[in-house]
Amino acid sequence: MSAKFDVHQEITDRIVAALETAGEFRLPWIRSGGSMKRPVNIASGKPYNGVNIVSLWVAGLAAEYPSHLWGTYRQWQDRGCQVRKGEKSSLIVFYKKLEFAQTDETTGETETGERLMARASFVFNAAQVEGFALQSDTALPAEPAFDPIERAERFAIATGAKIEEGGDKACYIPTADMIRMPERRRFTGTDTTTPAEGFYSTLCHELVHWSGAKHRLDRDLTGRFGSESYAVEELVAELGAAFLCGDLGISPEPRADHACYIANWLKVLKDDKKAVFTAASKASEAANWLIGHDVTAST
């Protein structure tokens, strides 16, 4: 008898494998080529959320797909397209509401309700189908022309966060409810990011931390992760920053301080198959909440 397919474990294993092979200072959702936009479903036109963003980014990076558009076999057929023979699908998860009835043996009373059950779904990238006019994401007509740095500046101001530049460390200071950033002129850029992209991607990381304050999203991970909550909060901030960078059209900056967290993230993910689902869900919530402050950034 074959073992039951566990979608939580399968997605976690794929993300763990990507983390382990991405390199000491590199994360699998930071790339120099391909699409860094949020993955979008071809049928609904809506972006994926939570762990599905990470799962599809990892799959897209491994195969170097240039598009952020995904769909099931049938969804592509409905668009008049055909998935090429031999193409390998990528895994996502969706939750289906199931009704249940439970009878109390003592009282005989029956309780009814709904449960969310995780279900696996398999999707294909636009680069894997025939009959679809594949375009570079930089030329997709659905995205208005913009200067990504101006857009990032506008977004940061729209959040209303108190941001001060000075010192040599980027951090969110809860006691003062403010973000401190090194002066932007101190950012030098990397092989994959400009100095400005480095500044704004770092700022996005701190804005995700800022969003979790009690009087905002009230993100407290201690009850779920205990002593590992700090490492998981850093994963939430890193994922949230990557989601925001995808929305804003800027490349996240690879940071050397990732190395001290990656080992902790791997331990948490290996010990708890649902940890990355929680982290990605919280990151998606934070990114959506932050980007929602700027109507111009989501249109």
Image (cartoon, rainbow, N blue to C red):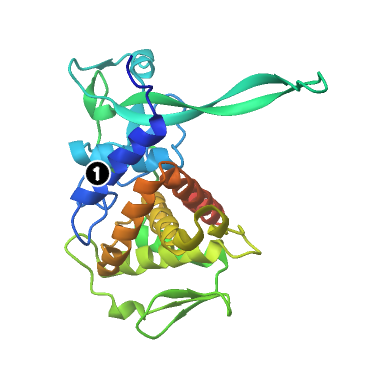
Q: In which image quadrant can residue 188 be found?
A: bottom left
Q: Residue at x 44, y 37 (%)?
A: 47
Q: Residue at x 39, y 24 (%)?
A: 121
**In this rendering, position of residue 203 left or right of residue 128:** right
- Residue 168: where, in percent of width, then height? 34, 83
Q: Is residue 145 visible?
A: no
From this view, report whether residue 131 is shown above or below residue 7.
above
Amino acid type, mark 1: Ala
- Residue 232: where, in percent of width, then height? 43, 57
- Residue 12: where, in percent of width, then height? 35, 40
**Circle 1: element type:** helix
- Residue 63: where, in percent of width, then height? 19, 36
Q: Nearer the viewer, residue 134 or 92?
A: 92
From this view, report whether residue 128 is shown above or below residue 167.
above
- Farthest bottom residue in view: 167
**In this rendering, position of residue 71 left or right of residue 129:** right
Q: In which image quadrant can residue 196 be found?
A: bottom left
Q: Which residue is denoted by mark 1 in the rendering?
A: 17
How many numbered marks does the figure carry? 1
From this view, report whether residue 243 is shown above or below residue 126.
below
Q: Nearer the viewer, residue 189 or 3?
A: 3
**In this rendering, position of residue 170 left or right of residue 292:** left
Q: Answer few, some or many: residues within 10 Å of disc 1's Cα (few below 14, many 20 plus, some between 14 and 19).
A: some
From this view, report whether residue 190 is shown above or below residue 45.
below
Q: Is residue 212 visible?
A: yes
Q: Residue at x 24, y 44 (%)?
A: 17
Q: Nearer the viewer, residue 227 or 208?
A: 227
- Quadrant for the N terminus in the image: top left
